[in-house]
Amino acid sequence: MKTCIVIGAHGFIGSAIVAEAQQRGYAVTAVDRDNYEAQRGASATLLINANGNSRKFIDERDPAQGFELSVSSVLNALLDFKFDQYIQISSGAIYPREDNPQHNREDTPLQPAGMSPYGFHKWLAEQLVRHHAPRHLIVRLGGVVGPRLRKNALFDLLTGNPWFVHPDSEFQYMDTRDLARALFTLHESQLPAGTLLNLSARGTISVRRMAEIANVSIPESALACPQLRAELNVERAASLLPLPSTEETIRRFIADVHSGDITLS
């Protein structure tokens, strides 16, 4: 029987991974903070750790807490559970530049001393995975949307929150459901041990274009906000599996919100 442990099973990304694993016939051990101690010592053929902190402000405000959430928690998972293969959800924040895909390929030289506290903690977690789990896959993510979305420019746009970025800002988004499918496709394709991949949808979309698709007016105050850009190089991932475009991803997500299939709060 195929077995899978998911750490952070009820979170934004983890819940999509659990749903995909069950659909593929895996017996899933769903682990979260409430049952962690009870599940400690569980074993499976695959462990996916989707438990890392995604709130960058925590690492800036309180680096010790950020370290606990993104580094210590990873070490605990590596030592507390038994598995044959381990998948670590990491972040493109590790790279010196997230805005230009020519500067954030998987083989881009890294500069730990120059990383943000958030990126540095993600990098440290990766080193622990490499040391303790020889048969591992590390995926560095860009922006993410999906059921249970609680933050980002698209969330603000759809919920009427204040905008914090200029409408000409460009972002790259992958749906958590596509992400979960990609993780299991990669796992089942038997990639070489120690594979590292950037994983996101192809290309970017502007906030202005998202507003057009959602039929939302651009607030005048947004014109004074900073213009940002984020795009990971996903050429390696695209050579291994089909990736949707970011615009396709956003169109589908907005349609799901408008139809009521996804509720934002």
Image (cartoon, helix red, strand yellow):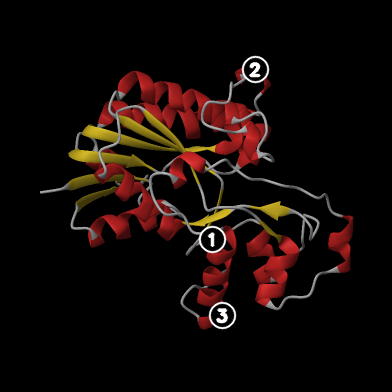
In the rendered structure, are the residues bearing label 1 and label 3 in contact, judged by CB atoms less than 8 Å apart?
A: no
Local packing at callout 1 (Cα closer than 10 Å; few below 14, some 14-19, many 20+) is: some
**Residue drawn at the location 57% of the way across and 59% of the way down:** 246
The disc, 3 or 2, on the residue closer to the chain's N-terminal end is: 2
Read off the residue under disc 2.
Answer: 113
Q: CA distance from mark 3 to mark 2?
A: 44 Å
Mark 3: amino acid: His
Say which of marks 1 and 3 sits in front.
3
Residue 232, compared with residue 28, is above or below; it is: above
**Residue drawn at the location 52% of the way across and 71% of the way down:** 252
Of 200 and 74, the residue lying toward us: 200
Read off the residue under disc 1.
Answer: 149
Percent across and percent down for residue 67 are: 53, 28
Percent across and percent down for residue 35 are: 29, 46
Percent across and percent down for residue 41 are: 20, 34
Say which element carries label 2.
Answer: helix
Q: For residue 23, which quarter of the picture? A: bottom left
Q: Residue furthest bottom?
A: 259
> In what quadrant of the picture does the C terminus appear?
bottom right
Q: Residue furthest left?
A: 1
Of 58 and 178, the residue lying toward us: 178
Mark 2: amino acid: Ala
Tell me, for residue 208, which label it has, or none: none
**Residue drawn at the location 32% of the way across and 44% of the way down:** 186
